[in-house]
């Protein structure tokens, strides 16, 4: 990750911590819990604790952290030593109280640790942002109405080989071009915004219509893959127990069939909704889109990840809103809805998907 993007992530994260008043809410819970430990027979303290927990839960539920992209969350995890935030922190705190109903002193100890960690994190973020600003290192900005695709190519998959990295970038270009041609009727040169190297992470600018189709398709592939992942885990467990590959071949065939059926539906729906160009090429484009989706699904199964981020449009200065503006606003809302459901799935073990990546010739 480059330093400008890091600046962007921690700046947004700092704003969220402040807006939700996470530290203040946690300190209120700690204070009320301390009162119960000191004077357990005071019912008012119990009431105050419940109220402060409700306020904290409300803040955690509305935290923007919950809708951060997987790669935003991964960066935050790295700089906070894997600490929980948002709904995950709510679950952690719920667990603390559920496990210590009759031992509030232990709950206080656990909450106190969280408070102290948050103080360290907020101090570190404030100092880091101050340092970046003093060095005139700006935050990476996404222009209003602009959408970017984040695409991670695992080093392990390409074995750190330059030629393999080049091939995978070409595959991404093929995938995006098939979406672009299906949606707009033509291909385009996609612009690379950023490349990071911890894992090979590319950020590519997409048009809103194409981004909408990509985000919806990716969401559906991931939702379907979650079902297949259970089959994959069972298949790999059987292999670990010495079951021959030929005995699990039918399981692999079944899993691939599930994804292939879903992908054909996705491709057909995209073509039916968007493609208005030469009718003679409709089948060709649909077949190409099928292959692009197969490539994407195969790579997700091999640990690749996808994220999509879009910057909303500002409200117009006048009340006059043209048709294009309204259309773009709706597209952005649609992209955001799908993008929020695109989660990183840790695809451990031997891949199970082997979907065809070229059109079979008769």
Image: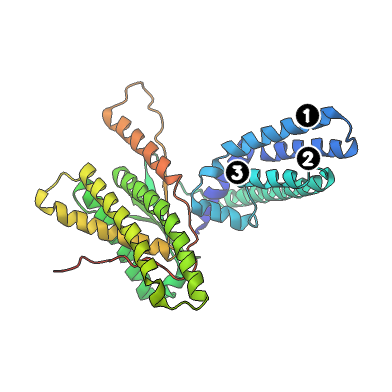
Q: In the image, which is nearer the foreground, mark 1 or mark 2? A: 1
Q: Residue at x 34, y 68 (%)?
A: 354
**For this rendering, which residue is in front, 233 or 46?**
233
Identify the residue under disc 2. Answer: 30
Tag 1 or tag 3, which sits nearer the N-term?
Answer: 1
Residue 114 on image: x %, y %: 73, 48
Tag 3 or tag 2, which sits nearer the N-term?
Answer: 2
Q: Residue at x 37, y 27 (%)?
A: 316
Identify the residue under disc 3. Answer: 86
Mark 1 to mark 2: distance in Å? 14 Å
Q: Residues within 10 Å of mark 3 (few under 14, many from 20)?
A: many
Tag 2 or tag 1, which sits nearer the N-term?
Answer: 2
Residue 60 on image: x %, y %: 62, 39
Mark 2 to mark 3: distance in Å? 18 Å
* Callouts 2 and 3 close, C-beta under 8 Å: no
Q: Residues within 10 Å of mark 2 (few under 14, many from 20)?
A: many
**For this rendering, which residue is in front, 331 or 42?**
42
Q: Residue at x 43, y 71 (%)?
A: 157
In terms of secondary structure, where does tag 1 sit? helix
In terms of secondary structure, where does tag 3 sit? helix
Residue 30 on image: x %, y %: 78, 40
Question: As displayed, is residue 291 above or below residue 104?
Answer: below
* Callouts 3 and 1 close, C-beta under 8 Å: no
Q: In the image, which is nearer the foreground, mark 3 or mark 1? A: 1
For the question of whether residue 142 can be seen, the reply is no
Q: Quadrant of the C terminus?
A: bottom left
| Residue that sits furthest to the left in the current view | 280
Identify the residue under disc 1. Answer: 47
């Amino acid at each position: 990750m480059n330093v400008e993007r890091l600046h962007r992530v921690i700046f947004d994260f700092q704003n969220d911590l402040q807006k939700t008043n996470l530290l203040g809410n946690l300190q209120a819970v700690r204070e009320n819990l301390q009162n119960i430990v000191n004077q357990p027979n005071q019912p008012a303290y119990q009431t105050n604790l419940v109220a402060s927990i409700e306020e904290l839960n409300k803040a955690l539920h509305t935290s923007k952290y919950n809708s951060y992209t997987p790669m935003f969350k991964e960066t935050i995890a790295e700089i906070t030593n894997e600490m929980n935030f948002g709904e995950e922190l709510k679950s952690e705190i719920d667990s603390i109280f559920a496990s210590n109903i009759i031992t509030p002193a232990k709950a206080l100890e656990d909450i106190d640790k969280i408070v102290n960690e948050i103080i360290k994190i907020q101090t570190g973020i404030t100092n880091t942002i101050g340092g970046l600003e003093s060095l005139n290192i700006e935050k990476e900005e996404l222009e209003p109405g602009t959408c970017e695709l984040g695409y991670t190519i695992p080093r392990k998959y390409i074995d750190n080989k330059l030629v393999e990295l080049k091939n995978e970038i070409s595959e991404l270009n093929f995938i995006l071009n098939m979406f672009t041609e299906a949606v707009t009727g033509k291909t385009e040169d996609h612009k690379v915004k950023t490349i990071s190297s911890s894992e090979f992470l590319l950020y590519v600018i997409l048009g809103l219509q194409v981004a909408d189709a990509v985000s919806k398709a990716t969401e559906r592939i991931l939702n379907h893959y979650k079902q297949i992942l259970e089959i994959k885990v069972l298949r790999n467990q059987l292999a670990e127990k010495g079951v021959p590959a030929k005995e699990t071949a039918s399981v692999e065939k079944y899993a691939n069939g599930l994804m292939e059926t879903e992908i054909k539906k996705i491709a057909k729906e995209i073509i039916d909704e968007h493609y208005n160009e030469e009718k003679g090429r409709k089948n060709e484009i649909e077949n190409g889109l099928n292959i692009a989706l197969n490539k994407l699904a195969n790579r997700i199964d091999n640990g690749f990840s996808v994220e999509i981020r879009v910057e909303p449009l500002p409200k117009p200065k006048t009340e006059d809103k043209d048709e294009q503006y309204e259309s773009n606003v709706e597209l952005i809302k649609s992209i955001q809805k799908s993008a929020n459901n695109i989660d990183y799935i840790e695809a451990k073990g031997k891949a199970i998907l082997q979907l065809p990546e070229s059109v079979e010739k008769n």
